[in-house]
Image (cartoon, helix red, strand yellow):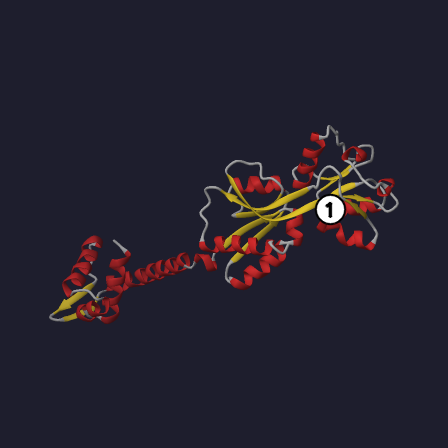
């Protein structure tokens, strides 16, 4: 028994006529008659009574009609929703802390204006969580700062940013004309948590310069680190976008490092086997476009 059989039945039931149903369905009368007979044979019931050229509904036909109508309506609704899934479905996007605060909100606003019926679920967390989530199909796309180290993930760059050395006003390092990584080793470090892209990049540089970093404070919240630096608890390295305002106000001193530019790429990332729908491809293009001005 098929959806086609049920749609034929519904037309015959509504019109009580094989001839008129065949015309509307653009079928031959024998084909419509055969479909009705196949249903009656399949269920072992009589759906219509045939007296001369007149067709009358039987009790079994009335019962069948209620079920067939529900099934066909559900099928048609499923067809429409799946065909329009790009506009009414769901997209799950994750972002690291900096991108989640300074890039993601305007991106989501623009995308929701373009696809108002699309449900967008966003999550802000660290890079390790995002990469594992992409592997486990918890996210469709992710915005990640710095290198993407996990195999099976495809990463496409869309913007750059940099880390700055963050000092409290009056710190003795602020008086130096040039600051090297070796200069920071003797000061208390306040760093992002392990698993964040900022922490991973710093550990890479520390390793290259044979520096052992033992932070006196770790936090997933950059604002907590900013406050701790302002209070004189230590020094930190944070993305420029997090600290530029405080640097301009004078509540923090911001310096670039001598040996390293601490530049890093920002990537839009997805699983290499992920099916990219039309909407997701559009999402990626919008990310790249907005990244030019980020």
**How many marks on residues?**
1
Label 1 crowd bin: few (<14), some (14–19), many (20+), radius 10 Å: many
* Residue 3 shown left or right of residue 195 in the figure: left
Residue 30 in percent (x, y) is at 14, 63
- Quadrant in which residue 187 is drawn: top right
Determine whether 5 is above or below 170 in the image. Answer: below
Residue marked by disc 1: 222
- Quadrant in which residue 12 is drawn: bottom left
* Residue 283 shown left or right of residue 59 in the figure: right
Which is nearer the eye, 278 or 54?
278
Residue 152 in percent (x, y) is at 50, 38
Which is nearer the eye, 3 or 105?
105
**Residue that appears at 54% across and 48% down:** 141
- Quadrant in which residue 220 is drawn: top right
Q: Which part of the image, by quadrant, shows the C terminus?
A: bottom right
**Residue that appears at 64% across and 48% down:** 160
């Amino acid at each position: 028994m098929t959806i086609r059989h049920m749609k034929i039945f519904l037309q015959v039931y509504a019109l009580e006529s094989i001839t008129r149903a065949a015309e509307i369905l653009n079928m031959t009368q024998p084909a419509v008659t055969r479909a009705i007979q196949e249903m009656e044979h399949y269920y072992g019931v009589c759906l219509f009574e045939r007296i001369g050229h007149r067709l009358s509904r039987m009790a079994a036909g009335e019962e069948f009609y209620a079920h067939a109508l529900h099934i066909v309506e559900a099928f048609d609704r499923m067809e429409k929703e799946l065909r329009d899934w790009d506009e009414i479905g769901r997209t799950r996007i994750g972002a690291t802390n900096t991108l989640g605060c300074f890039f993601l909100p305007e991106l989501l606003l623009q995308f929701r204006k373009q696809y108002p019926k699309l449900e967008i679920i966003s999550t802000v967390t660290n890079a390790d969580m995002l990469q594992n989530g992409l592997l486990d199909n918890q996210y469709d796309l992710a915005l990640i700062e710095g290198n993407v180290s996990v195999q099976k993930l495809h990463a496409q760059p869309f913007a750059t940013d940099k880390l700055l050395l963050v000092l409290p006003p009056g710190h003795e390092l602020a008086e130096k004309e040039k600051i090297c990584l070796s200069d920071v080793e003797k000061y208390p470090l306040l760093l992002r948590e392990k698993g964040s892209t900022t922490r991973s990049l710093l550990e890479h540089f520390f390793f290259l310069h044979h520096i052992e970093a033992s932070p006196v404070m770790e936090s997933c919240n950059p604002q907590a680190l900013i406050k701790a630096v302002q209070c004189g608890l230590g020094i930190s390295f944070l993305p420029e976008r997090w600290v530029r305002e405080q640097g301009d106000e004078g509540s923090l001193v911001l310096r670039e490092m001598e040996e390293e530019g601490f530049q890093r790429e920002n990537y839009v990332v997805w699983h290499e086997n992920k099916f990219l729908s039309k909407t997701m491809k559009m999402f990626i293009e919008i990310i790249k476009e907005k990244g030019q001005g980020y």
